[in-house]
Structure formats: structure tokens, C-alpha cells
Image (tube, coloured by chain):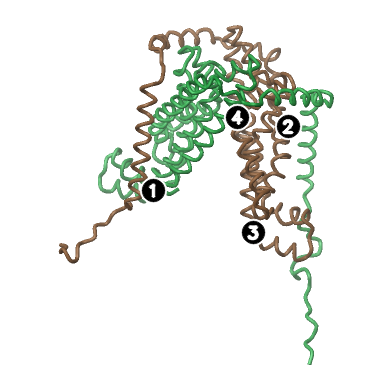
Chain colours: A green, B brown
Amino acid sequence: MSSPAPSFTPVPAHVPAHVRPFQSSWLARAGWLLLFIYLVYAMASLDFSWTRFVAGLEHGAKFISRMFPPDFTRWDLLVKGMAESLQMAVLASFIGVIISLPLGLLAARNLMPGFITWPVRVIIIACRSYNPVIVAIVAVKAVGFGALAGIIALTVASVGFVAKLFAEAIEEISMKQIEAVRATGASFGGVVIFGVLPQVMFRFIGFAAYETDANLRNSTLVGIVGAGGIGGTLFAAFQRFDYDFVFAIVLTIIALIMLGELLQIGVKKVFRQ
Amino acid sequence: MGTPENPVREWQRFTLTEKLGRFTVYFAIVAAVAWAAHSVEIIEEFIWDAPAQVADMGKRMWPIAWDYFKPGILNPLLETLNIAAVSTLLGILMAVPVGFLAARNATPNKFINMVARLILVATRSVNTLLWALFFVAVFGPGALAGTLAIAFHSIGFIGKLFSEAVEDAQKGSLEALSAAGASPLQLIQYGYWPQVKPTFWAIALFRWDINVRESAVLGLVGAGGLGMALDTAINLFQWDRVALVLVTIFAVVIVAEVIVTQIRKKLI
């Protein structure tokens, strides 16, 4: 007894023969072509050349050989700079989060009327569009060289980031709880404390931890323009061609950043995110 | 009412370990802030002087030197945009292979996974400005150094997100393809690529947006673009030109964000 040969069609019958699943459309092709032309133009304008590249490789090899071994003999400078960076990051995150709480609330479109959210949103966007190093330049002019300028720059960056995410988190909350709290006759403060905050607090802690991590990274940089921290030491060592000390500083910065990332993960785990 | 033999169990929101963990975090935050506020070096005279300095700066910035845009800002602006585009492309070209090597399902080899992950973490940990310092020392000042700096810093970001997208890919079509005898390249082309395509474009756009911002800063260490114009203006105390650069950066960042949101709406 033999069963009949199994008969099956490789393509389901309802798919018309001319449909080809992996073919791209003409519009997409035109887009690709435009992108390609632009990239060729951009590369040409950046003055890439093979001779420069080869010469660069030679410089690079020399540079790297001078970085080894990393020179930790001036560890007192290193520790002092790192401590200042850390202080700036901690204070900027703290102040930034405190400012972001009310700003985020004011920017949430489901709780506030348009004439309040718009100006607040513009402030938040302005804070976010400048890199902390650029804000640091202006801050150095305003409050002089040192940690204060760095704290101001990092705080501005924190507000731009945390307030935006906080506003978005508030806009995603469920309005049922808000209505329930309102129905009990609660004041606006009561609605915020018992209706809004319980819904967003956990996410908010996540944002704050992330921002602290980001501030830790940036606090090692703003010193390049004179705003305190290890960046100033790094830039000075660079300009004096002390590449072995530069390497020691960079290694320390990387260690600090990895530590910050671990801390961030730890905090999120504690708050079950 | 509970009795000694049968006590009423009180409802608690968090277990003891959870409470301890939270308390540790709160305590650490308070301790860190207190330490930082206590030991940070701030010169008080500078704070009291700040309002006068800010007013002075505002006065010098106004009126903004609009007529300087064409001779002094337009070219650096174009350079900034070109740096952003090319560095995103280079970053993607370097990050995608590393991302595939870091994904545990695409590369079932623990050692290669670890090396690839190390590359991703290391490139991400070194900030763009540090990369820029390095490449300026290697290739000399200019846009090339800036482009490579952003490209190398982007590897970690793009590669990490990309490898996560690859790891999230559904097994079904992949197994079907390998059962049909697809080569590894065909597996990537017809199995992984269609699945990670939306995420890939989202990552690329997001990174381009970030790179536009970053390329505006790089000039401060001599790596080309708007930052170079900013640095020159600041060193010469031409605050009206500084204001012009700041306004330009703001406009570019807003336009880039609008473009990204529009494309994302269409694509994804």
C-alpha cells in the first residue's frame, strides 16, 4: 500500500504571480540615489584623501606608542580632578531633577492649558538643543572659571532631558485615577500628589538615574572649556603632549563611567524597572 | 483581632530586602549630595558678580551679527551637516558587523560575542570630544578628524541597539531559511534584515540627529564645523558673532528634529 504522492504548491494560491516580496519600489530607489549622491558630495567636501590617511596612520602609531605605559605618577592631580567632576555631576543631577519636577508637570498637555505648556516647552527645548560644553562656555563667561560653571552647564542639560521625559511620562498616565481623585474634591496639589505622582514615580527614578549617568560622562568634559573637573587637567596634559598622562586620565574616566553604568543598573533593579 | 497563635498578617507593600535596598539608595543619594555640596570649590564673589556679567554679555551679544552669516557661518554650517551625515554612515558601516557579532543568536560563539560587546562598550565610553582630540593629533585639525571622532563614538550606540534588535528577531523565518539551505549571507539578507529593518532606520535617524548636535561642538578642539566658528568668535570676544552661532545651532537642531520626526512617521 502506498500513499499518494504529497501534492503542494510552493506559493499559496491566493498570492498573484507578479507579487515579488523583496522588490523595492521606484520611489525608494530614487530616495537611495539621492542619499548616495549627497553622501558622495559630503565625503568629497570633507577632504578625505589616501595620502592623508596613510600619513595619519603613521602619526597614530607614534601617538599610541607614546601613550604606553599610562603614567599614574601624578595621581594627586588625577584624584582632585575626578573628585571635582564627581561633585559637579552629583550636584547638577540633584538640582536638575528638582527643577525638572515642576517644569515637567507644567509642560504636560493633559494637565495644563496651552498657554502654560508652550512657553515651558520652549524652555525645555532650548535647554536640550545645546551640548553641555557649549552651555559651559557661556557659563564660564557668566560665573568665571571653575566648578560652578560646570554645575550650571550640566544642570541645564539635565533639565532639558529629564523635564522632557517627565512631561511625556505624565502625558501617558491614565486619566481615570485623576478623575477619581478629582471627584473626591481634591485640590490641584492633591490631584498631583495622589493621582499623578504614584503613576510616574518609578519611571521618574529611572530617568534621574539615567541622567546622573549622563552627567557623570559630561562632567569629565566641560573642563575642556574651563568649567572645572578632570577635563581641564586632560586638556592641559594633551596640549603639553603628555600622552602617557592623558592615557591614565582616559582610563580613569572609562572606569568611572562603567561604575556609573553599573550603579544605574543597580538602582533600577532596586526599584524593579 | 489577632491572637498570639493566629496573628493578623499585616499587608506590606515591600519586602524587607526591598525596603533595605530602597533605603540604601536614598541614603546614598543624600550622602552624595551632602558630600558634594560641602566639598565643592565655589568662589562666592563669582556668584554675586554673575548678574552683572550676564547683563554685560547680553549687551555685547545684541544686536546679533546677522550679516556675518554668509561670509563666516554658512560654510562651517555645511561642514557640520556633512560631518554629521558621513560620520553616521561610517558609524553604521562599522557598527552593523560588530552588532551582528555581538548578537547571541546570529553569532553563537560566546568568545566572539564578548569581544564584540567589549568593542561596543569601549567606543561608547570614550566621549566624542576625546575621540576628536585623538584624531586631531593623528590626522591634524579639520573635518576629517571630526568625522572619524563621531563615527567611532557612534559605533557603541548603533551597535548596541542593533544587536538588541537582531536578538529580538523571530526564529521562524530564520529556521525556515536555514532548512532551505540558505547561506549565512542569504540568512542575513532574507531572514534578519527584513525583521530588523524598521529598528535599523529608527536607530540611524536617531543617531544622525545626535550627530548633528555633536558635530556642532567638535570645532572647539579643532575638528571642524560650527564649533570652530564659535571658538574663533569667543577667543576674539566677538559676542555678537557668538550669538549668531548659538542661534544657528538652535535652528539646525530644531530642523533636524523635525525632519527625523517626519521621516519616522512615514517609515515606521
Chain where mark 1 sits: A
Mark 1 against mark 3, which lies toward the viewer?
Answer: 3
- Tell me residue A88's x, y (percent): 45, 24
Q: Residue furthest right?
A: A51
Instruction: Identify the secondary structure beneath mark 3.
Output: loop
Asked whether disc 3 touches disc 2, contact meaning CB atoms under 8 Å apart, the reply is: no
Instruction: Identify the secondary structure beneath mark 4.
Output: loop
Chain where mark 2 sits: B
Q: Which mark is residue B86?
A: 2
- Tell me residue A13's x, y (percent): 76, 71
- Does residue B198 lie above or below A223 as drawn? below
- Does residue A180 lie above or below A211 as drawn? below
Chain where mark 4 sits: B
Mark 2 against mark 1, which lies toward the viewer?
Answer: 2
Q: Amino acid at mark 4?
A: Asn
- Tell me residue A55's x, y (percent): 80, 23
Q: Amino acid at mark 1?
A: Met
Q: Which mark is residue B170?
A: 3
Q: Which mark is residue A66?
A: none
Marks 3/4 same chain:
yes
- Does residue A48 lie above or below B234 as drawn? below
Q: Residues within 10 Å of mark 1 (few under 14, many from 20)?
A: some
- Tell me residue B201's x, y (percent): 67, 44
Residue beneath disc 1: A175
Q: Sequence order check: which comes first, mark 3 or mark 2?
A: 2
Asked whether disc 2 touches disc 4, contact meaning CB atoms under 8 Å apart, the reply is: no
Real-space CA distance between mark 2 and mark 4, rounded to the nearest whole angstrom = 18 Å
Residue beneath disc 4: B127
Q: Is residue B85 left or right of residue A266?
A: right
